[in-house]
Amino acid sequence: MQRSSPHQSPATPEINAGGFTEGKVGGHLVRLGSFMAMGTLTMNVAQLAEAVYLGMLGTEALAAMGFAFPLTITLFAFAGGIGSGASSVIARAMGAGERAQASILVTHAQILSVVVGVVLAVTGYAYAYEIVSTLGAQDLVLELTVDYLRVYMIGVPFFLLSIVGSTLLRATGSAASPGVVMTVGSVIQIALGPVLIFGWFGFPELGSAGAAWAYVISRVSSVALYAVLLANAKLMTWQLKGIGQSWVAIMHVGAPAIASGLVMPISMLVITRLLANHGHEVVAAYNVASRVETIAHMILWSCSSSAEPFIGQNWGARQYDRVRRALFLCHSFCLAWGAVTFLFMVAFGASLVSLIDDNQQVVATAETFFLIIPLSIGFMGMMQVANSSFNARGLPRPALVISLLRGVILGIPLAVLGDMLWGYTGVFAATAITNVLLGLLAWQWNRRSVERQAGG
């Protein structure tokens, strides 16, 4: 990987000289986490609004979105993996004072996002029917799912650019901008959804495909805003020299991070297939309940994703005590938020689902979901914090092992066993048990790794 000279020329772009290596640890984490929470919450409110709109079309349209969900999560795995790899190398470069190199890496990471995004979009569009039919979708649900996905794939390159762009801004020290841009994009999606789905204001009535078009337009808008922010902040250096070395450095963390991210969609594909055996109402319930629960989960994701650039910069600057303090605060928050989520979901979860789809089977299944899954959400957050810590320090393999254990080695066998013994209730219980076990394992593994590397 290229190294910048310690004596930068006057033309060399400066990138947030302060960063996260000074000031109160809690203050940085709150600032990073609050803006990310704002962005991720509005993204999930947009997804929930999409579910509301499609629920108005009927249970079949809602089930179609449920069958599409594992594929959309797969795309997020690629975006998150590239973002984690780029964040790791950029944040450590920033912490070590290598600002010129960080600027070059920002540019090369975005080019990589476009290349990967185009490949994924073409593949997903071409094989949408085969993938969805394999999941068990049939008849009208199959048709609606394919219509949704083929439009959705058009926005995949923009989706990757927007997710990676938010990661790059945080890695270089910007706390507010990513959350603001994510919020703007989500508001656009919420506003356009009913217009395109139901054909308001003279627009054609596009149904489920209209929901996908609203998403595509929102991603294009987000990319345009990120481009303006990156250009104004001089966070890009249009230099292709060394792009191969940059991609190798990014993918050293990014490739295992993508593999880690793909484990969850694979697990969800299996779970969706198991639930499909109990009827499309159960798939619809799982889709809606997951989206309601994901709003709470995104707070934990904001916590763990905010820890990543903070840990990366301070690790690069050898500020190990600040890393330990950040991990303690993040773990404490995860457990507290998990308790709050459980109480809220038990009290109000089923009512929220009934507002989207009042089908009795859908509501009853969702109620069972909320009695089981939220109990484990705090431990899932601890697992995510550990994975962010490993990636930030340039150690992607432990995160991959943890993800494999959660999704394939432990999660899927438990889900199959649970389905055999107790039906869809057993599938939900298997997910919760896996989250608790892996959360505790990840916490201990990360703690010992930090102490060993820091020499403590």
Image (cartoon, helix red, strand yellow):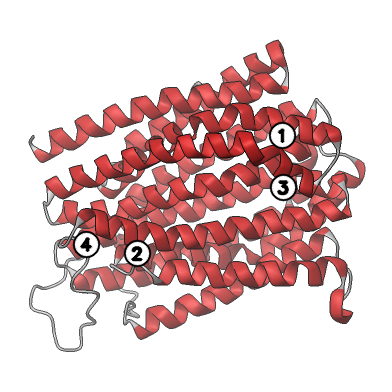
Labels 3 and 4 touching (C-beta < 8 A)? no
Of marks 2 and 3, which one's residue comes earlier in the chain? 3
Comparing 278 with 394, the one in front is 278
In this view, the mark in front (2 or 3): 2
Badge 4 crowding class, 10 Å Cα cut-off, few under 14, some 14 to 19, many 20 or more, is: many
Going from N to C along the chain, the mark reached first, 3 or 4, is: 4
Is 68 or 297 nearer to us in this picture? 297
Q: Can residue 50 be seen in this view?
A: yes
Amino acid type at circle 3 is Ala
Determine the residue located farthest toward the bottom in the rendered image.
Answer: 10
Quarter containing the C terminus: top left
Disc on the earlier residue, 1 or 4: 4
Could you tell me if the residues under marks 2 and 4 are in contact, i.e. CB atoms within 8 Å?
A: no
**Residue at image point 17% right, 68% down:** 98
* Mark 1–mark 2 CB contact (< 8 Å): no
The amino acid type found where label 1 is placed reads: Ala
The image quadrant that residue 436 belongs to is: top left
Label 1, label 4: how far apart the Cα atoms are: 41 Å
Query: In the rendered image, which residue does mark 2 sit on?
Result: 170
In the picture of the structure, the residue carrying the numbered disc 3 is: 68
How far apart are the two marked residues, 2 and 3, measured between alpha carbons?
A: 30 Å
Check disc 4 and report the residue beneath it: 20
Q: How many other residues sit within 10 Å of disc 3, few (<14), some (14-19) or many (≥20)?
A: many
